[in-house]
Amino acid sequence: MTLNDTLLISLRAVTSYRVRSLLIILAMALGVAAVVMLTALGDGARRYVVNQFSSIGTNLIAVMPGRAETSGAFLGATMGRTPRDLTLKDAQLIGRLPQVRRYAPLNVGVAELSAAKRLRDVTVLGSTADLIPIRHMNLAQGSFLAHDSEHSAQIVLGAKLAEEFFPTSNAIGQRIRLDENRFLVTGVLALQGETMGYNTDEIVIIPIDYAQSLFNTTSLFRILVEARSHSDIPSAKEAIHDTLKKSHDGEEDVTIITQDAVLDTFDRILHALTLAVAGIAAISLAVAGILIMNVMLVAISQRTPEIGLLKAIGADAADIRHLFFAEALWLSLAGTIIGFLFGQFGSLLLRLAYPQLPAWAPAWAIIAGVIVALITGILASLLPSSRAARLDPVQALSKK
Amino acid sequence: MIDLTEITRIFKMGDQSVYALHEINLNIATGEYVSIMGPSGSGKSTLLNIIGLLDRPDSGRYALDGKNVTDLTETEQAQTRRDKIGFVFQSFHLVPRLTAAENIEMPLILGEIPPDERKSRVADALQAFDLQSRAQHRPAELSGGQRQRVAIARATILRPKAILADEPTGNLDHSIGAEVMTLLEKLCQEGTTLIVVTHDRELSARAKRHIGMRDGKIVTDSS
Ligand SMILES: Nc1ncnc2c1ncn2[C@@H]1O[C@H](COP(=O)(O)OP(=O)(O)OP(=O)(O)O)[C@@H](O)[C@H]1O
Ligand SMILES: [Mg+2]
């Protein structure tokens, strides 16, 4: 029997026994769809986190006061030392390093914003002009600390705050109070939504010296540093470390975190999670395989007289084996394709339901899912089809 | 054409051995019309199965067309069966999901005949057995006589040298059975060897040679 005829005749059997075929295809499809959808979810979560990290800046290094101890934690504590403050001078020293493209000292606090009859508490960022490009923020209008006004009392409002406080007029050029201090609105941030847990639409940005006097501190919350390039990050980190150690009289009392390291960690964790989820989904494929095997065995016992007849009219064992094998192949192929489409459709629904989540199944998961499904189908049909091939024709024919 | 020498077929049931065939010697020439009769369990079907290479004897020699076929491999047996033997069964044994035309086509597919030739040969067979109007019907939609005609068309589509019919009229009305026998006899007149197992004396009488069996042995053989 030719390959072509084997495929056609087995396809006829698949389409003739509808309920049986649908059952198998469904089981297979669910397994494949589960792999596609769950990995889409896992990888989507991974990409979501990666995107969030990149959206707050590139090649970022954050310097914060105090040492995040991982060992010998109580050494500093027993000696009764509090970590030295991180100062504007430290920030300027970092700014002079060759690996550093730009830097921004940062203070964060809460103050009461008021204008006309409105008033509310807002998060205040105190920084320098470079904060805007480092943090990938965009100004919808105006500017922040333009060159000729570096020490004036100016304020940039988050998009929502500008809308709230100045719904009818342009916010630029308006006066607004932060606690007891007057500021001139020079810029409004573009609407950005929430990233990394806080909403830039509801913050205000003021110059660092005003922030320090507002919060009555000389210590910085942190220094954000942007390295010149990705490859400069390690040496920049080291240079910052050395610089600050020198300026702090040999004390290693700062913590330096690179965006990369955090990103890598999240990337690894979420990738592992995706793999685990894919593995669990693949178990449903194994279940589908067992189902295929059982249904094929039942099919063979139901079609025993037919097998006997085929042998009587000249089919040999190989013909019979190929026929049942091809049948299982069709079923798993159909299940795989339909499952793939289900999975992609499910991922689409996920993306529609959670627009921020890039729920696309990664190529490796799709390829692995399809291959595992097909191999499962093939393995599951080996035993039934060889059993069919071995049937004794006389006994098969006489079976009712 | 068919040469059986001391053919024995034993079925073992537990520690009991049943001699389904006991040292059978039989020669059948090409184009002969043979009927086999005998009580139930006398070994008629077993004999037919061995002649048709569906079953192997436990001992003895079988030469088909002068060629020893006792020791053929499974695949060689299947090929010989396909090319030289046509089976007709009491219960028709049509594939239920295939149409009449497709059932008739099956041996051609197994014989890897090209599709164009398959089509024309199936069309010829449908015409020869007066089944044109039923070509696209499934077995469930056919009458018993029509089913058996499909089965005979299938058995003869590769122009076998012998047709082996095991109670071909057993599931048919008397008159329909007679019609089916007429069809088979027509094939025989065209030169095909015809061996029919039957319980029906009247039908058996139509054959040129009558073989009687009992307890796995041939007890009468008359022409
Ligand atoms: N597969 C088998 N296993 C065990 N015994 C068998 C088997 N096939 C046939 N026999 C035995 O062999 C003997 C001959 O059987 P066979 O089917 O050839 O008889 P038969 O003449 O065709 O009978 P019937 O007229 O009822 O069809 C019987 O005793 C039967 O029980
Ligand atoms: Mg019988």
Image (cartoon, helix red, strand yellow):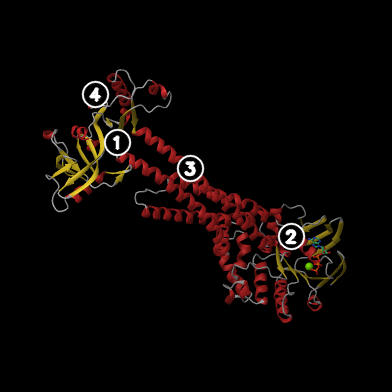
Q: Does the residue labelled 4 lie within 8 Å of ligand 1?
A: no
- C-alpha separation, residue under disc 2 versus residue under disc 3: 53 Å
Q: Quadrant of residue A295?
A: bottom right
Q: In this view, does A171 lie to the left or right of A19?
A: left
Amino acid found under the numbered disc labelled 2: Leu
Query: What numbered label is drawn on residue B54?
Result: 2
Q: Nearer the viewer, residue A101 or B185?
A: A101
Q: Mark 1 points at which residue?
A: A58
In the rendered picture of this protein, how many numbered marks are placed on residues?
Answer: 4
Quarter occupied by residue A92? top left
- Is label 1 or label 4 in front? 4
Label 1–label 4 contact, CB within 8 A: no
Which residue in the structure is indicated by mark 3? Answer: A275
Determine crowd level at label 1: few under 14, some 14-19, many 20+ residues with C-alpha closer than 10 A.
many
The lab-note entry on whether marks 4 and 3 share a chain reads yes
Q: Identify the amino acid type marked 1.
A: Thr
Residue furthest bottom as drawn: B175
Q: Which of A325 and A276 is in front in this view?
A: A276
Task: Find the distance from the CA under tag 1 to the CA under tag 4.
Answer: 21 Å
Instruction: Name above or below for residue A277 compared with residue A63.
Output: below
Residue B91 in view, yes or no:
yes
Tell me residue A182's x, y (percent): 14, 40
A25 above or below A126?
below
Q: Is mark 4 on a helix, strand or loop?
A: helix
